[in-house]
Image: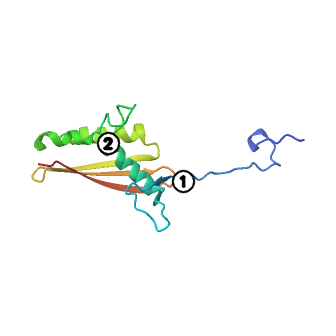
Amino acid sequence: MARVFAQEDGNLEVVPITATREKTYKDIDLTFTARSSGDVFKKNDAAAVKQAVKNLLMTNRGEKPFDNYYGGNLNDFLFENMVDIDTIEIKDKISHAIGAYEPRAMLRGVAINALPDNNTIDVLVQFMVVSTMEIVDLNLELTRLR
């Protein structure tokens, strides 16, 4: 059996084998809406990653068993004075959560709009899905109940 070398090794008569593996992301739809077949709907690629990022950011620290630091912990900002909300701290928490716990998403930007009259904070998170290079916008509305 002859040994096959790559082109870098000097054997230019043998064409190297290159292969790519496309990664698809799949998840179940958390609305648990039943299909006609009785199964639940699935989310693929960008929709699955978007759902995972939303769940990550809306989870409070300490809610996930055995990982006390998991989550975006954004609900903490709802109990501060709406005038004193630090948008840089919110952006840092979002950036840290996505960077540490969601390897399928690469954060591109965060925009925050605090609405003190409505007791809400509108958050726009823009990220890129790593496998498909698709850019996704996620709108979150954090609302404090009276």
- Left or right of 93? Residue 11 is right
- Left or right of 40? Residue 96 is left
Secondary structure at numbered mark 2: loop
Q: Is residue 67 visible?
A: yes
On the image, numbered disc 2 is attached to which residue?
Answer: 59
**Residue 77 image point, x, y percent:** 20, 40
Amino acid type indicated by mark 2: Thr
Q: Quadrant of residue 81?
A: top left
Q: Residue at x 68, y 51 (%)?
A: 19
Q: Residues within 10 Å of mark 2 (few under 14, many from 20)?
A: some
Q: Is residue 134 visible?
A: no
Quadrant of the drawing holding the N terminus: top right
Q: Nearer the viewer, mark 2 or mark 1?
A: 2
In this view, the residue in front, 45 or 87, is 45
**Residue 34 image point, x, y percent:** 43, 63
Name, please, the residue furthest toward the right. Answer: 1
- Left or right of 60? Residue 15 is right
Q: CA distance from mark 2 to mark 1?
A: 25 Å
In this view, the residue in front, 59 or 16, is 59
**Residue 69 image point, x, y percent:** 35, 32
Q: Residues within 10 Å of mark 1 (few under 14, many from 20)?
A: few
Q: Residue at x 76, y 44 (%)?
A: 7
On the image, numbered disc 1 is attached to which residue?
Answer: 24
Q: Earlier in the sequence, mark 2 or mark 1?
A: 1
